[in-house]
Image (cartoon, grey):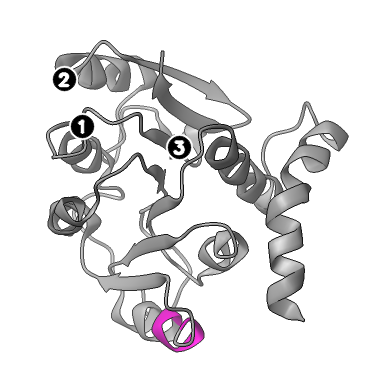
Amino acid sequence: MIKFLKKIYAKFAPFWIIRLFPNRTAPALKRFNFILMEAKKNNIKTFVETGTYLGNTTDAVSGYFDKIYTFEITKELVEMAQKRFADKKNIEVIHGDSGVELKNILPKIDKSTIFWLDGHYSEGFVHAKKYDLDTPIINEIETIFTSNIKDFNNIILIDDAFEFDGTRGYPTIDELRNIVKKYTDRYDVFVKYDIVYIIPA
């Protein structure tokens, strides 16, 4: 019954949620629906997430995607996610720094992909470790645009656009545009509902 309801949610919820709340920054429920809307609009069935954390995003979209790769650097969170998704064959939970490990799964992908980049230091979580940079976002972007799937029509969404202030490993939005343009001019970079969109122009 739960699996059936999640499939119904994945099919219909994205559209009415956005219409009901058109002008707000994205709360958790709405973020899930942005992902699903882009996936449906572009007929994309592969999802890569960096920053599993408690696994709520993965769980919310798992009824739609054929294959999900989710990265988490904190061992305790990885173990929690692996236990949570043990019966879901379409989900692969990967332990490691996504800025380093992302390149190892991209050769497995042979079609357009939705990337949800949300890997950052999880302040307040008792087992989270403070790393040199709060986010691996620059390494993640460069990995995607130099990989075997760089010529596909991928959709890249990055949570918490307000963080892009040029500190703690976050570029500014203009710097991010320049990083993308270094590799391709096929993509637009803009912010909507506190989400950074990097999508084919």
Q: Judge depth for marks 3 and 1 and give the one in front.
A: 1
Which SS class for mark 3? strand
Is 77 in front, or is 87? 87
Give the answer, above or below, for where 42 lies relative to 175: below
Is 55 in front, or is 185? 185
**Residue picked out by circle 1:** 150
Q: Are the residues at dot 1 and dot 2 in contact (C-beta closer than 8 Å)?
A: yes
**Residue picked out by circle 3:** 157
Tag 1: residue type? Lys
Tag 2: residue type? Tyr
**Residues at marks 1 and 2, CA–CA distance in whole angstroms:** 9 Å
Which SS class for mark 2? helix
Give the answer, above or below, for where 172 lies relative to 100: above
Query: Residue 19 at x, y = what percent?
Result: 83, 32
Span of residues in magenta: 81-85
The prevailing secondary structure element of the residues shown in magenta is helix
- Pick the quarter of the image with the C terminus: top left
Q: Is residue 176 magenta?
A: no
Q: Around disc 3, counting alpha carbons within 10 Å, would you say few (fewer than 14), some (14 to 19), or many (20 or more)?
A: many
In the picture, measured across the screen, residue 180 lies left or right of residue 146, that is right
